[in-house]
Amino acid sequence: MKLGAVVITMGNRPEELRALLDSVAKQEGDRIEVVVVGNGAPVPDVPVGVRTVELPENLGIPGGRNVGIEAFGPSGADVDALLFLDDDGLLPLTDTAELCRQAFEADPELGIISFRIADPDTGVTQRRHVPRLRAADPMRSSRVTTFLGGANAVRSKVIAEVGPLPGQFFYAHEETDLAWRALDAGWMIDYRADMVLNHPTTAPSRHAVYHRMVARNRVWLARRNLPAPLVPAYLGVWLLLTLLRKPSGPALKAWFGGFREGWSTPCGTRRPMSWRTVWRLTRLGRPPVI
């Protein structure tokens, strides 16, 4: 299989970006073609052979990655699968790409692979980085219902069939939107503990727009993808979970602002998943009400 890699950057982590690109170049097997997208910022110096695209404005995470996809032809058609890697991550093992090739070749229904994210100093994988409800053991690989945005591989046929990431999301939940559409089209998603991306331990709330975007996009996700009876159930559960987590006053205010925005603004084309897909998600351990 021919692999490509998409990396988006704000140009503010040149050393980390260079280390990531070096780790991609060290992967066993055929060379991986890499495209680095400057998301509203100039791209720092990159090794010879790495292609770059500089956008005049920040299109957000999904928008930037979509530009990277199209750099490999329509829906990434010039390659068989694309790796999406955070610019401050690093592939510590040299066989990750080869394991991706083997996994896709062995399972024609496999559409997306989610890597394990580990802190480079401690080796710890945060619970939120295991894309399933039963996340106590990050070393256990399994079928899952979503994937990690900056540490994954997606078969280009999936993008061609179900479309790209939802650019209007800008930040948060774009992976689950693509995952649900892929599952509804019959593709499967694997979490692989043996495919590792090193990434410093961080809190998602470090982003100023975190609480608003998480709430708004959660509503959009439901409105776009769920059968009508499940929309209030899904959003009601997440409202309850948010309150139980006891966020600060400003955070809760931002969250409710985003929640209202999700209902009052266009969410894109609505394509509710089939009830068969709802059952598939349930059998995989995560019914689409949580």
Image (tube, rainbow, N blue to C red):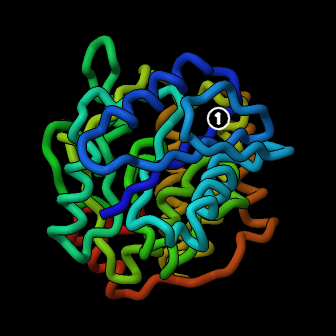
Looking at the picture, how far across and down is residue 58, in whole percent? 78, 43
**What residue is shown at x 30% (from left), y 38% (from top)?**
27
**What residue is shown at x 78% (from left), y 71% (from top)?**
266
Q: Seen in the image, is 143 located left or right of residue 223? A: left
Q: Is residue 277 above or below residue 132?
A: below
Looking at the picture, how far across and down is residue 190, in whole percent? 25, 58
Q: Is residue 239 above or below residue 285?
A: above
In front: 190, or 280?
A: 190
Q: Residue furthest top?
A: 121
Amino acid of disc 1:
Thr
Instruction: Determine the image quadrant of residue 225.
Output: bottom right
In front: 219, or 27?
A: 27
**What residue is shown at x 44% (from left), y 57% (from top)?**
82
Looking at the picture, how far across and down is residue 150, in whole percent? 47, 42
- The residue under label 1 is 9
Q: Seen in the image, is 218 located left or right of residue 189? A: right
Q: Is residue 90 visible?
A: yes
Instruction: Determine the image quadrant of residue 36.
Output: top right
Q: Is residue 44 above or below residue 107?
A: above
Q: Is residue 133 visible?
A: no
**What residue is shown at x 28% (from left), y 47% (from top)?**
97
Q: Is residue 158 above or below residue 251?
A: below
How would you rate the neighbour count of disc 1 (Cα within 10 Å): few for under 14, some for 14-19, many for 20 or more?
many
In the rendered image, the quadrant that contains the C terminus is bottom left
